[in-house]
Image (tube, rainbow, N blue to C red):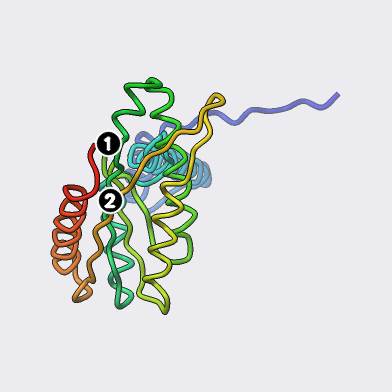
Amino acid sequence: MTTVVERATVDPAAALIAARAELHTGQPSLDTFAQLAQATEILLAQVDHLADQLTEARTCPLTRLPTRALWLAQAEEVVATGPSVVIMVDLNDFKPVNDSFGHTAGNAVLAEVGARAGDWSTGRGCAGRLGGDEFAFAVREERGLGQAITALRRRLIGPIAHDSQRLMVGASLGVARVYGRTPQALSGALHRADLRMYREKGQTGRR
């Protein structure tokens, strides 16, 4: 019969204090080094856990897209790599879906739009949900980007199946080139794209 000897759990703070005291005497013991090693493992595991919690807090649980703060950080990384474009998207006729079919249907729309946005942005840059029914993209400039953005619009407004229903929404887009590779250049482009998005929404759509 094999006996399993459980290792006593080390208090990281106490282990560090004890190690510091022994290091001052110049005679740290092997037991102290062992406790330091275990304390390091515990602290690293806690850091990993906190990092996971932070990522979860900065990710929309419905769409699995980054929320505003995380998306902005990712967008800055995209912009820093070279010529880039930002796209702001606001869904049209989203409120009638909620009013007619309920919030479960509205959530289904947001989840599917988020999945489509994430798929389209993969390899190009990043997509995020800024809040409500508003989404944003930061993508690198590429040959045929105009056609790709047209395809994005078609993809976002495609029918969404939910409980034997075909849910439909529209999308207003605002596109702006980022003139520079700095966060300030990104901010300026987002402002222009936002204005263009709402200009289009005022002409062709409603919430």
Q: Residues within 10 Å of mark 1 (few under 14, many from 20)?
A: few
Image quarter hosting the C terminus: top left
Residue located at (30% from left, 61% from top) = 75
From the viewer's side, name the closer residue of 82 and 131. 131
Residue located at (64% from left, 28% from top) = 6
Q: Quick check: 143 left or right of 71?
A: right
Please, is residue 144 above or below residue 156 in the view?
Answer: below
Please tell me whether mark 1 sits on a helix, a strand or a loop. loop
Image quarter hosting the N terminus: top right
Q: Which residue is mark 1?
A: 132
- Going by the numbered disc 2, the residue's amino acid type is Ser
Please, is residue 48 above or below residue 99 in the view?
Answer: below
Q: Residues within 10 Å of mark 2 (few under 14, many from 20)?
A: many
Name the spot of residue 55 as percent of width and height, x first.
Answer: 38, 43
The residues bearing labels 1 and 2 have C-alpha atoms spaced at a distance of 14 Å
**Disc number placed over residue 172 in the picture, else none:** 2
Which mark sits nearer the N-terminus, 1 or 2?
Answer: 1
Please, is residue 145 above or below residue 73 in the view?
Answer: below
Name the spot of residue 204 as percent of width and height, x first.
Answer: 23, 49
**Disc number placed over residue 39 in the picture, else none:** none
Name the spot of residue 193 as percent of width and height, x first.
Answer: 20, 60
* Quarter location, residue 163: top right
Residue located at (49% from left, 37% from top) = 160
Q: Quick check: 140 left or right of 123?
A: left
From the viewer's side, name the closer residue of 36 and 144. 144
Please tell me whether mark 2 sits on a helix, a strand or a loop. strand
Question: Mark 1, mark 2: which one is toward the viewer?
Answer: 2
